[in-house]
Image (cartoon, rainbow, N blue to C red):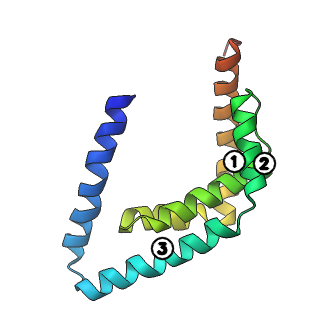
Amino acid sequence: MFWKLLALMLVWPMLEIGLLLWLQWPLEVSALEVLITAAVGWNFARREDLSLWSELVSDVRNGRVPTREGLDAMLVVLGGWALMIPGIISDILGAVMLIPAVRELALPGLRVLLREQAELRKGVSYPR
């Protein structure tokens, strides 16, 4: 896991910088894009109710599957954070996470993934 995370941390900035160089935007346009998306991301992340976030963390730590509201809040906060990261790819991912229809499509799969993780934490395994 460490090596995958390290590789991601090295590759992601290179992809972002490569895309910005490929687009050949003037520096002013790039700076304006970074500032605007960071402000929008900050606004979305700040507006989300942090009590839902703390409930989500508690559920995950205790091996429970979080509520739909908690997962939705998590996706909104993560989308806002992604918008605050400079770069086109992270901005696209952040904007996609802020679309309610996309979040609705992602919630069932995310709940299944978290349910499996909760079962692994508890040591329970069911045949597939």
Which residue sits at x=69%, y=47%?
107
Pick the residue in front: 111 or 52: 52
Find disc 2 in the rendering and name its residue.
68
Q: Quadrant of the N terminus?
A: top left
Location of residue 104 with respect to 110 vertically, above or below: below
Q: Which quadrant is the C terminus positioned in?
A: top right
Q: Which residue is mark 1?
A: 107
Left or right: residue 40 compared with residue 3: right
Q: Amino acid at mark 2?
A: Arg
Other residues around mark 2 within 10 Å, as few (<14) / some (14–19) / many (≥20): some
Q: Position of residue 62 (x, y in %)?
A: 74, 28
Q: Secondary structure at mark 1?
A: helix
Residue 72 appears left or right of 10: right
Which residue was labeled with disc 3?
A: 38
Q: Nearer the viewer, residue 40 or 99?
A: 40
64 over 14 or under it: above or below: above
* C-alpha span from label 2 to label 1: 7 Å
Q: Residues within 10 Å of mark 1 (few under 14, many from 20)?
A: some
Q: Using the image as rendered, state which of residue 81 and residue 111 is in the foreground.
A: 81
Foreground disc of the pair 1, 3: 3
- Crowd around label 3: few <14 · some 14–19 · many ≥20 (10 Å): many
Image quarter of residue 125:
top right
Q: Are marks 1 and 3 in contact (CB under 8 Å)?
A: no
Mark 2 vs 1: CB contact within 8 A: yes
